[in-house]
Each structure stands twice: as C-alpha cells, then as structure tokens.
C-alpha cells in the first residue's frame, strides 16, 4: 500500500488516473504482476481464456449447458455468435481503455470494467454507435439458436439480477459506481496474484473518483477472494431453486460491493491518493 499526493484544488482526468495507476507499479516488488491496458492483439487469447476459465463455473453451466442443448446442431452456431459478440465488445472496451491485462500473461488474464459517471464528465451519447447496434443484432440472433431451456434460464437470470440491483443499487445511483463486469485468469496463471492485481487496479481508479465498485461473482467459491480485496456480499442472486430441470444445488451468485476508500469531499480537494496494489495476493 502506498500514498500519492496531488496539489490542492487540482482535478485529474481519466487518462491521468490511468497513468498514475500504471506508473506507480514501479514501486511494487520485483516480479509482482504488472497491470497494463488490454490490446486489440490480445483479444483472441482473452476469448479463449474466458471459455477455459468459465468452463467449470456453476453459473456458466446453468445458463449455457442445460440438458436440452447438449448435442444440438444449434450449439456450435450459438457459440460462434457468442464469441463474435464478445470479440466486438472487447474491441469496444479496449478502445475505451476499460480492459486491463497483466503484462506477464497478456490476454491470459484480464478484467473488464465500466467507470462511474462523474458530474464533470461530458454527458454520454444517448444514440447507440454502429458497433453497439451490431452487437445487439448478434445478441438477438443468438436467441434463435438457444434451446427453450436456455431461453427460460436467461430470462430468469435477467429478472433476478434486475431485482437484486433494485434492492441494493437504486437505478439513480448506478452511474455513481464502477462495475467490474468480467474477470478471467487462465488456470495456468491462477494463484499468481494476477486476479488480485487486476481487481485492485480497477478499485484504485474507483478510489480516485471516490466511487464504490460492484460486481456479480459467478462462483460463490470465489467469495473469499473478493472479500480479500475489499468486497462484501450485499445480496445473493439464486438460480435454479425453482427449476425442475436443474438437478444440482441452486446456483448462488453474490452481488458484492466495495465502498470507496475516499469520500467525495476528499476528491474535491484532491487529498491523499491510496493505490491498493498488493504483490502477495
């Protein structure tokens, strides 16, 4: 842990915040994970990493591996469509600098995030971009190749997440939070501290904006990991509890929140900055 100071009354830009996060890693121990921006050339590897990392995940198997989808000729087409939409989304986030990787693994570990909207930021465009329209078109096409049970489970997922968000994160407050909406580490790199480094980098940016951070953990087994980097469970999204076609235990997806380590007033006067990088997690 270490502190940085800025002059009183100064206000940083998102690019300056990124530069601060990356430059301060020089103070980490030798051999510690080095977080960098994900590049367009890393995307193919990132997609493979996500597929491999999520394969044993209970949330993934509940939504994407129902019995009536196994062996169907539609599933390879659905997978190709999902990968295409993911590839376009990753290109979008890379361009917007909202995707990090670890230098030592380059695409074999990554985190995706959406930043909080600050009152001083220019208002976001309300018109979808051509890329957004293409992603949405692919997602609509995916539904045509989903099995009936996949469609039911997807509807269940969306409905229960919306209910959990409304309970914990009122709609008029959501834009004040950072969202971690994707984290994956290839199994050969798990246990190397890459996941912690990636999450801590996003949380450092959030702290610079005095913004809390939230996420949905797709595997309850990862709760201890997220607790270790400051997240606490606010509510559980429970899937499969009333689904007769699901023959395993209900799938628990914790909605977790990490409060900012700085207050809004501290940001306004630009007090000390805390960057919580850890070389040992």
Image (cartoon, grey):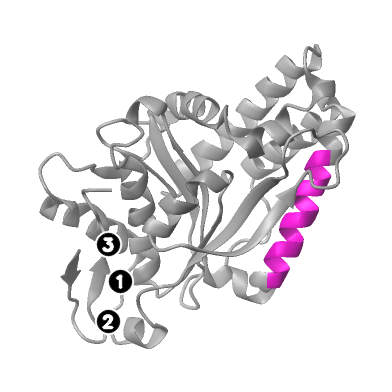
Q: How far apart are the alpha carbons under marks 3 and 1? A: 18 Å
Give the mark, 1 or 2, whose residue is nearer the N terminus. 1
Give the numbered dot on residue 12: 1
Between 250 and 201, the one nearer to me in the picture:
250
Give the mark, 3 or 1, whose residue is nearer the N terminus. 1
Quadrant where the N terminus is found in the figure: bottom left
Give the numbered dot on residue 99: none
Residue at which label 2 appears: 270
* Horizontal arrangement in the rendering, residue 44 relative to residue 100 (left or right): right
- Residue at figure coordinates x 25%, y 73% from the top left: 273
Q: What SS does tag 2 mark?
A: loop
Span colored in magenta = 153-167
Q: What SS does tag 1 mark?
A: loop
Q: Is residue 96 above or below residue 107?
A: below
How packed is label 2: few (under 14 Cα within 10 Å), some, or many (20 or more)?
A: some
Q: Can you give x and y, in whole percent of width and height, for residue 149 in the image?
A: 86, 32
Q: Can you give x and y, in whole percent of width and height, for residue 171 in the image?
A: 69, 71
Give the mark, 2 or 3, whose residue is nearer the N terminus. 2
Q: How far apart are the alpha carbons under marks 2 and 3? A: 17 Å
Magenta part mainly helix, strand or loop?
A: helix
Q: Can you give x and y, in whole percent of width and height, for residue 27 in the image?
A: 11, 55
Q: Nearer the viewer, mark 1 or mark 2?
A: 2
Q: Are marks 1 and 2 in contact (CB under 8 Å)?
A: yes
- Residue at figure coordinates x 62%, y 40% from the top left: 131
Give the numbered dot on residue 276: 3
């Amino acid at each position: 842990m270490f502190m940085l100071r800025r002059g009183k009354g100064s206000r940083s830009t998102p690019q300056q915040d990124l530069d601060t996060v990356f430059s301060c890693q020089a103070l980490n121990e030798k051999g510690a994970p080095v977080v960098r921006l994900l590049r367009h050339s890393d995307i193919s590897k990132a997609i493979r990493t996500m597929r491999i990392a999520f394969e044993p995940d209970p949330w993934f198997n509940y939504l994407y591996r129902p019995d009536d989808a196994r062996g169907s000729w539609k599933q390879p087409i659905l997978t190709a469509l999902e990968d295409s939409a993911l590839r376009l989304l990753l290109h979008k986030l890379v361009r917007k600098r909202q995707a990090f990787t670890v230098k030592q693994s380059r695409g074999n570990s990554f985190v995706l995030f959406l930043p909080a909207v600050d009152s001083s930021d220019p208002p976001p465009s309300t018109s979808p971009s051509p890329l957004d329209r293409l992603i949405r078109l692919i997602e609509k096409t995916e539904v045509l190749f989903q099995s009936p049970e996949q469609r039911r489970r997807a509807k269940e997922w969306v409905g229960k997440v919306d209910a959990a968000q409304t309970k914990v994160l009122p709609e008029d407050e959501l834009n004040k939070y950072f969202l971690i909406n994707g984290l994956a580490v290839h199994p050969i790199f798990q246990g190397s501290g890459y996941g912690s480094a990636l999450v801590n980098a996003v949380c450092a940016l959030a702290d610079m904006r005095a913004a809390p951070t939230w996420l949905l953990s797709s595997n309850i087994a990862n709760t201890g990991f997220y607790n270790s980097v400051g997240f606490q469970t606010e509510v559980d999204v429970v899937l499969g509890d009333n689904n007769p076609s699901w023959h395993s235990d209900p799938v628990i997806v914790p909605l977790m929140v990490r409060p900012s380590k700085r207050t809004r007033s501290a940001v306004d006067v630009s007090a000390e900055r805390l960057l919580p990088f850890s070389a040992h997690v």
